[in-house]
Amino acid sequence: MAGRAFLHANCIFRRCELEMDHASYLRYLISRHASLSLPYSFATKLSFLASPLVLGRSTMIHCEDTYENVGAFGFAYGTGPGEYEDRENCQLEVFYIEEKRRQPDLLIAAASELVEDIREGYAGVRYVQFWVQWSAEASEGRLLRRIAALPGASRTDNGALTLYKLPLVELERWIRGFEARRAKRRADR
């Protein structure tokens, strides 16, 4: 369905399916390329940002009230070393939320949309993986520690980068558990 959008956590998740969506997605991420913490040349960053438009899916996140862009994510089915034939692996190429908007509800809503998009696009995905620039602060970050601690997840340091790989079913289970805990806290107030 062209231009499909979902409303969640006071944000609209709009899948980039039209040419104008592709242009908006690329303009948005290119304008923030320095904030993405990718230790590559601009040309290499651009290839990572654009590959979801061809090899997977990309989504823009807008604020419901102002329609301001507040984030984007994109992934590819398969990995470069596997010639994109290892489609049981889904590589998250970019997952960005504006710093002022980085709240648990939006993070979980975006992760939930990501999982739904992965499942809808190719049911054979078993693993989600992503690279982050290695730093002592990043490796000690609470979110990355939780991801690495999920059953079946792995963390591999490779020079200036760290690869996180986790089973998609465990990511789904973690998201559902987090959503349930947040809902219980709200109900208890």
Image: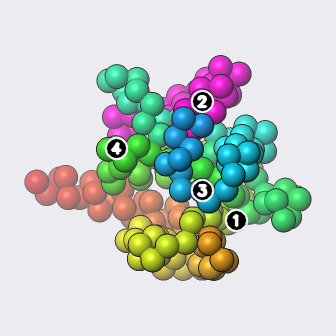
Is residue 3 shown in magenta?
Answer: yes
Between 22 and 149, which is closer to the camera in this rendering? 22
Residue under circle 1? 126
Label 3 or label 4, whichever lies nearer to me, is 3
Q: Earlier in the sequence, mark 1 or mark 4?
A: 4
Magenta residues? 1-29
Asked if disc 2 and disc 3 are in contact, CB closer than 8 Å, the reply is: no
Q: Which residue is mark 4?
A: 101
Residue in the picture at 54% in, 35% down: 31
Q: Tell me the distance, in whole angstroms, between the alpha carbons under discs 1 and 3.
A: 25 Å
Give the x, y percent position of residue 40. Answer: 67, 56
Mark nearest the camera among 1 and 3 is: 3
- Say which amino acid is labelled 4: Arg
SS for callout 2: helix
Mark 2 or mark 1: which comes first in sequence?
Answer: 2
Foreground: 154 or 31? 31
Q: Residues within 10 Å of mark 2 (few under 14, many from 20)?
A: few
For label 2, the residue is 27
The residue sitting at the front extreme is 41
Image quadrant where one finds the N terminus: top right
The residue at 62%/59% (across/down) is: 39
* Residue occupying the point 41% across, 43% down: 98
Residue type at mark 3 is: Leu
Label 2 to label 3, Cα distance in Å?
A: 17 Å
Residue type beneath disc 1: Arg
| Residue type highlighted by circle 2 | Arg
- Element type at marker 3? loop
Residue 141 drawn above or below residue 45: below
Q: Which residue is tagged 3?
A: 38
Q: Relative to 81, does residue 16 appear above or below in the rendering?
A: above
- Residue at 39% x, 34% y is 11
- 158 left or right of 147? right
